[in-house]
Image: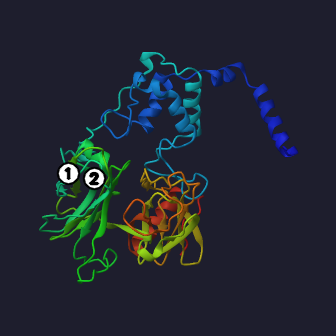
């Protein structure tokens, strides 16, 4: 039954439609065309994957390529399963550098285009083609006036046999560095198109004798420093470019400890993974250091999911210095359902920073905060990572709801952590960042209070 207040709202809506001028009403009824209305949306939000020889099953660059998929496209954009963007739009920060989600207006335009017969439109309305790097080219090289990264580190080859079970390949490769170098951008990729089809994800961990306590990792049972997270590749991720005047530090004698997850590709495929590193020029040292942390329930005792249950896990990370959180990327497996990152400030205030309410194991999205939205957090802040797993039959990705699930590398096992990139800064620089943020957005309550 509709409540009276709802009837009043509906009545007002009908009155608004009745008062619309003919020109406005006619514009709403106009059927969008591919060349004028749809192609610009596809260029902005879809072609990164939907182009020839890329990871998507079809290209959407031309009308002839897109038209056979019109109804499927309509269903995917209405359900918000495409483009893959799983942040809850009602909670936490909403300004991101890499937001590829469709606006309500864009979804409406695509829906009306399909319902109107998916017309092509006037060829003169077609926007100029978007220039994409070769699928096996380097995305950032041209921005630095280069043909390739300054340093390319390759994993040792692995052949994934047809029909073989999932494999985790973990070779160790020396970086070859003989002096400290500051990094301004990183790319990571399987070396071939076929390699992309069998590589679920690839992690490059940086192992080095750290001089900075904020970046130092625990030692292993032999007393050697454990490798820290440097970069990850997964479907939908291309690389990471540091903010101006900030970077990551690679030290002499360092090594890359690879962690590559290969799956069955239906044929024998041999591949390697390539790590491309772009350095600041020698003598140009950035002011701030970025560190990519692993936060959450990251060990065997943190994940314990009985059959046919929903389970919540949590983990905490204490910021030992002031910092700016640059990005957030949840990581779970097939039972993963949702993940939230919140900040517990030194004054006791709790703020939700981001909430992924529709986690999808097939898409490892990194949510990169916009410059004026990235959380500025004081020393002593606790970042809390909460994860939810669904080990029931209601989870369509669940291979078997009747088994116990624990922590492990296999896809049928589980994890519950987030990759969180933090730029650290001292008190003076932190205050300057706060003042600059307030000057730009004086009416907005700051993310933190000392």
Query: Where's residue 306, x and y in %?
Result: 54, 69
Say whether residue 248 is left or right of residue 181: right
Q: Which mark is residue 149?
A: 1
Judge depth for marks 1 and 2 and give the one in front: 2
At which x and y percent is residue 436? Answer: 47, 61
Residues 209 and 415: in front is: 415
Q: Using the image as rendered, state which of residue 313 and residue 394 is in the foreground.
A: 394
Q: Is residue 308 left or right of residue 332?
A: right
41 in relation to 435, above or below? above
| Residue 285 figure quarter | bottom left
- Mark 1 or mark 2: name the one nearer the start of the chain: 1
Q: Are marks 1 and 2 in contact (CB under 8 Å)?
A: yes
Q: Is residue 224 above or below residue 267?
A: below
How far, Cα to Cα, is label 1 from label 2? 8 Å
Circle 2 sits on which residue? Answer: 187
| Quadrant position of residue 24 | top right
């Amino acid at each position: 039954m509709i409540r009276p207040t709802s009837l009043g709202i509906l009545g007002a809506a009908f009155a608004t439609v009745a008062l619309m001028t003919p020109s406005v009403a006619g514009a709403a009824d106009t059927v969008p065309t591919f060349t004028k209305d749809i192609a610009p949306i596809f260029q902005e939000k879809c072609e990164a994957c939907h182009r020839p020889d890329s990871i998507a099953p079809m290209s959407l660059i031309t009308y002839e390529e897109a038209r056979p998929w019109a109804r499927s496209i309509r269903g995917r954009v209405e359900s918000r399963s495409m483009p893959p963007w799983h942040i809850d739009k009602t909670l936490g920060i909403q300004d991101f550098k890499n937001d590829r989600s469709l606006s309500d207006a864009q979804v409406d335009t695509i829906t009306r285009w399909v319902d109107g017969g998916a017309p092509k439109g006037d060829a003169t309305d077609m926007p100029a083609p978007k220039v994409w790097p070769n699928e096996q080219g380097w995305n950032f090289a041209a921005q630095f006036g280069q043909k390739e990264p300054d340093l390319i580190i390759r994993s040792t080859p692995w052949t994934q046999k047809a029909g073989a079970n999932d494999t985790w390949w973990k070779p160790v490769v020396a970086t070859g560095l003989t002096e400290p170098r500051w990094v301004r951008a990183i790319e990571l990729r399987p070396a071939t198109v076929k390699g992309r089809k069998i590589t679920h994800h690839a992690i490059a961990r940086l192992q080095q004798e750290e001089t900075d306590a904020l970046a130092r990792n625990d030692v292993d049972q032999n007393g050697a420093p454990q490798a820290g997270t440097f970069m990850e590749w997964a479907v939908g991720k291309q690389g990471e470019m540091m903010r101006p005047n900030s970077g990551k530090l690679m030290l002499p004698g360092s090594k890359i400890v690879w962690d590559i997850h290969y799956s069955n590709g239906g044929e024998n495929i041999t591949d390697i993974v390539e790590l491309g590193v772009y350095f600041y020029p020698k003598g140009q040292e950035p002011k701030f250091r970025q560190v990519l942390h692993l936060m959450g329930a990251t060990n065997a005792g943190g994940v314990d999911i009985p059959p046919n249950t929903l389970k919540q896990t949590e983990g905490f990370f204490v910021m030992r210095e002031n910092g700016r959180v640059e990005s957030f990327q949840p990581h779970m497996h097939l039972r993963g359902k949702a993940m939230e990152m919140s900040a517990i400030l030194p004054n006791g205030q709790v703020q939700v920073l981001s909430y992924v309410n529709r986690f999808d194991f097939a898409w490892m999205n990194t949510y990169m905060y916009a410059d004026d939205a990235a959380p500025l957090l004081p020393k002593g802040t606790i970042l809390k990572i909460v994860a939810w797993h669904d080990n029931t039959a209601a989870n369509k990705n669940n291979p078997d709801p009747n088994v116990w699930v624990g922590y492990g590398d296999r896809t049928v096992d589980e994890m519950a952590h987030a990759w969180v990139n933090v730029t650290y800064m001292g008190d003076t620089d932190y205050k300057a960042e706060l003042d600059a943020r307030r000057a730009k957005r004086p009416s907005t309550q700051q993310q933190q209070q000392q």
